[in-house]
Structures are given as structure tokens and as C-alpha cells.
């Protein structure tokens, strides 16, 4: 026997009204779900850590180098307020571009990149977790033409994120990387054993021409919709990904030497051999070519 379907026309007014309200609620819920899925896909698509590029890219992988209260940008010549994990050139409290270049060493895959990259030390359950690598990616920001991008000033010192932030920062994200991609979130979450816990920073991509500023922030800015603020011009956008050992447990409980995870920040001190960087900008960023680790190293080394 087929189930009986009530005829809405034969129902009492109150019952018909209730059914109509329920139908409207269901329709609203469906619209909300569709919108949620769309937003979710946009969020995931926009959070691909290293692969979904609309312009050329330079790829540098730097092995972990040292740990200590070292920060020659914020605390030149003295001990920094908290410990950092450092990679790249041989950074000391007295480092400058000239000193990094003169030292000549680097932990990066590109010999011409002797820049220093560092971020606060991370611990889980009171135990320090040492990074495996600190990776650097240079490209043009969304909406900015590779042809319009300039190199940053010599001896550039730049930060992404604020150590005194009171909440999550849009330039700092956390993720669990696998096959060079990761869905990123404002706070860390536990990662599957076959994924790599990652802390990612997007640096300012607009410069006013100065290498530094007294507050370490006012000489740079972020572009919006492909345009830099008045008085600034587009430079290479740097994205830094700090990679921790795969299988690190309880990543959601991570803390930093600077405090809670919303105090995350990263620094970069220019130590590039400019011939190498110039060649890479031309062959990768301006040419719209995504240069991987080996290709980046080959181009940079051939320019020296």
C-alpha cells in the first residue's frame, strides 16, 4: 500500500501554515549549506600552501641552523626577548647583510641566499619541537603582475606577524602539510601522522624604499586588490613555512617562546647575492614560471 500523502488544500489553516513555515526553513537551511560549502571550498582553495600559484615563484628550502635568543632586527647587538629557531645564513645578534654575505655560509638549497630566516621556538607539553626546515617562497602577490615586482632594498629587514598580538593574525596560519599542500587555519590543530605540522607566514609585499624603520613595520605594507598603498611600490612577496617533524603529536596544544600561538611572527634579514636574485626574478617570477627547489638552485648558482 502506498503511503497516504496529505493534500495541503484539505489541511486546517494552522497545519498548512506550519507546513509552509517548515518548507521555508528547509529552503533557508539548504541555501545556507550551499553557501557554507562554497565558502569552505574558497577557503581551502585559497589556503593551498605552496602549489596553487597564479604567478611565477622562487623556491628555497633551508635546513634548521641554530636556536637562541638572537634577533638582529628587533634586538641588534643584544639578547632578544625570547628564543628563536633560525635557518639560512649564520645569523648573530650583530648580523647585517654585508656580514651574512662575508660569512659565506648558508643552510639553504641556494648558495646565493645567505639571508637569515627565523621564528619563535615552538613547544608542545613543555618540550621544544625543533623545525626540520624553514622554507622560503618568493612570488608576486595576488593581483600584482610579475613584471611590476621590484627587488626589496639592500639590507632589508622585515617581519610578518606581531609578537604582542592579542588574537589570531591573518598573515600567520597553521596547517598539516602533505604533498606540498595544506589547508590552513588561524590556530594549530592536531595533525595526522603522515602529515607535517607547519607554521606559515606571509610577509608584506609593498615597500617605501627604506630597508628598515624604527618600529620595524612602517617601512612596509600589504597590497590590497593588487595595489600598494600610496608612497609604496610592489616588491617580491615572501612566504615562509616552518616545518616540524611529521607525526608531532598534540600540535593543537603548541605554544611559542613568545607566548600563545597568536603571538607568532617571523623575521627575514636580506643576505641575497643580488646577481642570483636578479636572475631568479627574471626567469621565474616575471616569466610566470614556478621554479622548484632544483630549478631555483640551478638558476641562482649559474648566475654567480
Image (cartoon, rainbow, N blue to C red):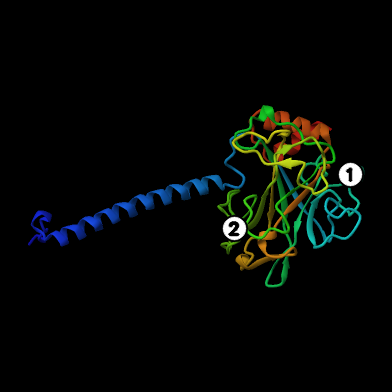
Tell me residue 60's x, y (percent): 73, 43
Spot the residue most to the bottom. Answer: 125
In the displayed structure, 66 sits above or below 103; it is below
Mark 2 near mark 1, Cβ–Cβ under 8 Å?
Answer: no
Of helix, strand and loop, which one carries label 2? Answer: loop
Specify the label residue 203 is tagged with: none
Q: Is residue 122 left or right of residue 37?
A: right
In the displayed structure, 237 sits above or below 191; it is above
> Which residue is at the front of the view, 182 or 10?
10
Tell me residue 114's x, y (percent): 83, 44
Specify the label residue 104 is tagged with: 1
Quarter of the image for the C terminus: give it.
Answer: top right
Quarter of the image for the N terminus: give it.
Answer: bottom left
Tell me residue 38's x, y (percent): 43, 47
Q: Would residue 268 be visible to someone looking at this image?
A: yes
Q: Is residue 182 left or right of residue 257?
A: left
> Which residue is at the front of the view, 296 or 135?
135
Indicate which disc, 2 or 1, sits on the residue closer to the N terminus: 1
Q: Residue at x 52, y 45 (%)?
A: 45
Tell me residue 215's x, y (percent): 80, 49
Q: Quadrant of residue 194?
A: bottom right
Q: Quadrant of residue 286?
A: top right
Q: Residue at x 89, y 54 (%)?
A: 93
Q: Dot 2 surroundings within 10 Å: few (below 14), some, or many (20 or more)?
A: many
Q: Would residue 58 be visible to someone looking at this image?
A: no
> Which residue is at the front of the view, 25 or 39?
25
Q: Quadrant of residue 257?
A: bottom right
Q: Dot 1 surroundings within 10 Å: few (below 14), some, or many (20 or more)?
A: some
Q: Which residue is mark 2?
A: 195
Amino acid at each position: 500500500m502506498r503511503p497516504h500523502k496529505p493534500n495541503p488544500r484539505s489541511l486546517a489553516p494552522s497545519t498548512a501554515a506550519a507546513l509552509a513555515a517548515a518548507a521555508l526553513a528547509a529552503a533557508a537551511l539548504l541555501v545556507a549549506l550551499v553557501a557554507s560549502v562554497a565558502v569552505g571550498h574558497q577557503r581551502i582553495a585559497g589556503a593551498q600552501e605552496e602549489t596553487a600559484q597564479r604567478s611565477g615563484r622562487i623556491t628555497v628550502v633551508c635546513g634548521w641552523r641554530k636556536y637562541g635568543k638572537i634577533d638582529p632586527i628587533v634586538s641588534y647587538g643584544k639578547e632578544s626577548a625570547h628564543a628563536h629557531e633560525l635557518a639560512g645564513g649564520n645569523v648573530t645578534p650583530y648580523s647585517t647583510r654585508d656580514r651574512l654575505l662575508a660569512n659565506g655560509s648558508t643552510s639553504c638549497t641556494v648558495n646565493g641566499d645567505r639571508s637569515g630566516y627565523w621564528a619563535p621556538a615552538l613547544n608542545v607539553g613543555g618540550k621544544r619541537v625543533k623545525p626540520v626546515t624553514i622554507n622560503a617562497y618568493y612570488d608576486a602577490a595576488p593581483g600584482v603582475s610579475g613584471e611590476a615586482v621590484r627587488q626589496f632594498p639592500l639590507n632589508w629587514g622585515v617581519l610578518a606577524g606581531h609578537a604582542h598580538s592579542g588574537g589570531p593574525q591573518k598573515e600567520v596560519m597553521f596547517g598539516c602539510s602533505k604533498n606540498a599542500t595544506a589547508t590552513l587555519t588561524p590556530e594549530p590543530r592536531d595533525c595526522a601522522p603522515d602529515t607535517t605540522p607547519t607554521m606559515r607566514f606571509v610577509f608584506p609585499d609593498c615597500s617605501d624604499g627604506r630597508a628598515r624603520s624604527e618600529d620595524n613595520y612602517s617601512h612596509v605594507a600589504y597590497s590590497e586588490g593588487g595595489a600598494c598603498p600610496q608612497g609604496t611600490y610592489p616588491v617580491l612577496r615572501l612566504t615562509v613555512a616552518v616545518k616540524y617533524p611529521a607525526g608531532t603529536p598534540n600540535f593543537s596544544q603548541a605554544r611559542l617562546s613568545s607566548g600563545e600561538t597568536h603571538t607568532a611572527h617571523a623575521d627575514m634579514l636580506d643576505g641575497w647575492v643580488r646577481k642570483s636574485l636578479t636572475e631568479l626574478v627574471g626567469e621565474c617570477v616575471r616569466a610566470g614560471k614556478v621554479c622548484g627547489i632544483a630549478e631555483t638552485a640551478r638558476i641562482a648558482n649559474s648566475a654567480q
